[in-house]
Every structure is written in structure tokens, then in C-alpha cells.
Amino acid sequence: MHQTNFMQKNIIWSLVFLFCSSFVSAQTVFHSLEDVWKYADDHNITLRVAGYDYQKAVYAQRAAAGSLLPQINATGSATDNTALQTTLIPAEMFGGPAGQYKPVQFGQKYIYNGGYTAQLDILNLQNWLNAKIARQNAIASKDSAANFRRNVYQQLASQYYSYLLMKEAAALAGRSMLISDSVNQSMARKFSEGLVSKPNADVASINFERARQSFITSQYQLLTAGNNLKLLLDMEVSDSVRIDDDWNNGMVRSLQDQPFADDPGLRLAADQVQTGMLQQRLAGSSFFPVVSVLYSNTTQQNDNKFEPFSKGPEWFPARYWSLKASWQLFNGGSRYYGLKKARITTLEKQMWLENSRKQTATNDANLKLAAAKAGELVMSTKKVMDLAYDNYEHITNRYAEGINTQDDRLSAFSDYITYQNQYLNNLSDLLVQMYLIKLRQMDFK
């Protein structure tokens, strides 16, 4: 029995050493959940990609706005007519006989041409609406990045508070393990002396093993939560992290007094409604004409010598203004049905937005209720757990004085473990409500 206890203690201390080597020698220290969120803003891959997507949407907005400006094109060419085209002209134009043709070549060997054109659509609803849609897409991309940020923050908070919960569980499991180890050794000694029965000794041994299992589980869950947190922070698994934070029940009461912020999911739904309305207007814009004004200014030089940079023959200019209108009068009804489809799509998005608002209001009300319930239950179960522990110590002292039996002591310890598990379950629920409330109070803009 002594050798078994020695091996068990070696296993426990090995786990403690593993835990300490992974967290105590930390290079990155977080003192609060806000520290973790701040670090994630610069390192989390999802948040960084969302930032890039927003930048691309801004560039797309600027590109769409550029279509509203005049389009200016410059052209230039140099032509070498190695063989001029031959044309047959009636010979009688040159004093020749009628009915015959004289081959002649028109043109010169080198032709230089240069100029520019400028065009501006003075009435083009599609370009104007496309620019507005691109602007709305940039707004939606920003709100989408905020929504991604909230989701990442929630994942980080889940792992962060899992760490704190496992830290609390490890502390309680360590205390329970020490108690059960003391009882187990006492029972083993008295069993060898014939003072207690084999079933009582077995119960004490079982309680110790269960306490040891809880301690082992909490240690490995603590390490797992740390590894998951590192992944979300874009760290290597070999990087060392330490969390110097603790929870208290007053944090929930103080959080409940603060108002909730706008839900980025709702803003994103509202953006979709605005985009749908613009898409509907874009579909309707195809019924209107496109009116453009065009200015062209070109010049040309002809020469039989290759001297493009000389003051050779005269340059001949050509300039003109043009006002052009185009209007598609009929295309088989596709524009009409496309417009009706866009109207239905907008109506659907408006319905979902209204439903999302109601759902968010309900979720917020239920969140406050769940947080209040969790806070009260944690205080109550902790009080019961502490009383159970005091009762166990009291019965242990009475057992040492010969007043209570060993069965009373084992029963008191079993009650303490039961209430400890209830406390940890309620604490887990409380920590979840805490970070959900924190997220709803953050303004993700």
C-alpha cells in the first residue's frame, strides 16, 4: 500500500511539473480578457483577413466612383506603307483612250497620327447606382469585419474562461485529493490493524482515486485550453503563455448595469436591405437611356521620307464634338421580370431584418436573466460547498475525539464532493454568461 501511494504521488507531482513548465515560465502574460482581445486584433488570422477584405471593398468603391468621371484616351500611330494600294482610274481622265484604265497609287509612304478623345456620360443611371452599390458594399464589408471580430472574440473568451474554470477546478481537486489521501492512508492503516472493515477501506481508496482523476482531468483540460488559446492568437504551440487573472461574482453584477451596444449582425442585415434596394433601383435603371458627350482631337501628317521629328509636311487636324444617346426599347421582357425579382428579394431581406431585431431583443433579455440566475446560483452553491467542507472538518475533529464514526466522516466527504461539482457546474455557466454580456456591451465598429 505504501508503494502504491508513493507511485500515485509521483504521478501527481509529474503532472504539476508539466503544468508549471508550460505556463509559469511564460513569455506572454495576459492579465484580463481584454488583453487577449487586444493581442488578437493584431495577430488572429481571421481578423487580419477581414481587414484585408474591407480594404479591397474600399478600393472597389473608388474604382466604381471612377466610372462617373470623364474617360480620356490618347492614341498615336506611325504607319509605313511598304506598298501603296493600286487603284484603276479611267484613262480618259488623263487624256487617254476611252474604255481603258490607268493604274495609279494614292497616298504617301509614311503616315503619322496622334490625338485624344474624351467622353463623359451625362446620363447613365447604371454607373451612378453601381457606384452607390460599391459604397454600400464597403460599409457592409466593414460591418462584416465587425461581425467576424465578435465571433473571434467569443471563441477567445470561451477558451479564456475555460482556463479560469479549470484553474478553479484544479485548486478544488487538489484540496479534495489531499483530504481523500489523508482519509485513505488512515483507513488503510486501521484496516491493517483490524479496526475497520474492508468495505470502508475500499470506499476510502475509491474516493482517493476519484479525486486524483479529477485533478488529472483539470490539469490536462487547463493545458488544452491554453493550446486552443494560442492557436486563436496565431502562436506556436511551443510558445509559453501565462494568465494572471481571477474571477469574482461582483463582476457579473457590475456588467449587468451597463447597456448593450449595437449588434453587428443586425447592422449587417440592415446593410443587406440597403444593398437590395439599390439592386432593385439598378434593375429599373435599364429602362432609361444613356446619354454621352464625346470630344475628339486628332492630327495627321503624311510624308514620303522617314522624318517623324522634323518640320516636314504640314499636320492636318481633325476635331469634333458628339452627343450620343442610346436607349434599349425592347429585349424580350427580361428587364421587367428582373425588376420584379429584385423587388421580391428586397422584401425578403426586410422581413429577415425585422425578425433579426426581434430575435436580438429576445436574446438580450434572456441573456440578462441567465446571467442573474447564474450569479445567484454560484453564490448559493459556493456557500453550500464551504459549509459542507466546514462540516467535514467538524466531523473529522469529532472522529478524532471518538464521537463520530468513520462512516460519518466518509459520508461528509462524499457530500462535500457532490456540492463541489455543483459549484463548478454553476461557475462554468456563470463564466459563459460573463463573456456573452461583455461581448454584447462592446461596440464593434
Image: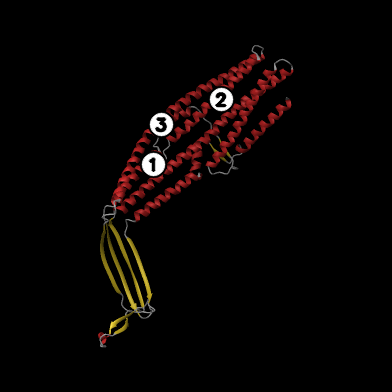
Q: Distance between the residues labelled 1 and 2?
A: 41 Å
Tag 1 secondary structure: helix
Residue displayed at 40% across by 29% down: 365
When the figure is inspected, residue 143 is found, relative to residue 246, above or below; the finding is below
What is the three-letter code of the residue carrying label 2? Asn
Which residue is painted at 45% across and 42% down in the image?
148
As drawn, the residue found furthest toward the front would be 99
Count of numbered marks: 3
Please tell me the numbered disc located at residue 421. 2
Residue 341 falls in image quadrant: top left
**Could you say whether the residue bearing mark 2 is in a helix, strand or loop?**
helix
Residue nearest the viewer, comparing 11 with 13: 11
Q: Position of residue 88 (x, y in %)?
A: 30, 81
Q: Answer with left or right where residue 126 lies relative to residue 3.
A: left
Q: As rendered, which of 11 and 24 lies closer to the eye? A: 11
On the rendered image, what quadrant is the C terminus found in?
top left
Examine the rendered structure and indicate whether residue 296 appears above or below residue 215. below
Residue 183 seen in render: no
* Residue assigned mark 1: 268
Quarter of the image with the N terminus is top right
Q: Estimate the x, y position of residue 378 in percent, counting from the top left.
A: 50, 24
Separation of marks 2 and 3 at Cα, in angstroms: 29 Å
Residue lying farthest to the top in this orientation: 403
Residue 113 in view of the camera? yes
Q: Sequence-wise, which precedes: disc 1 or disc 2?
A: 1
Q: Residue 364 carries which label?
A: 3
Badge 1 amino acid: Leu
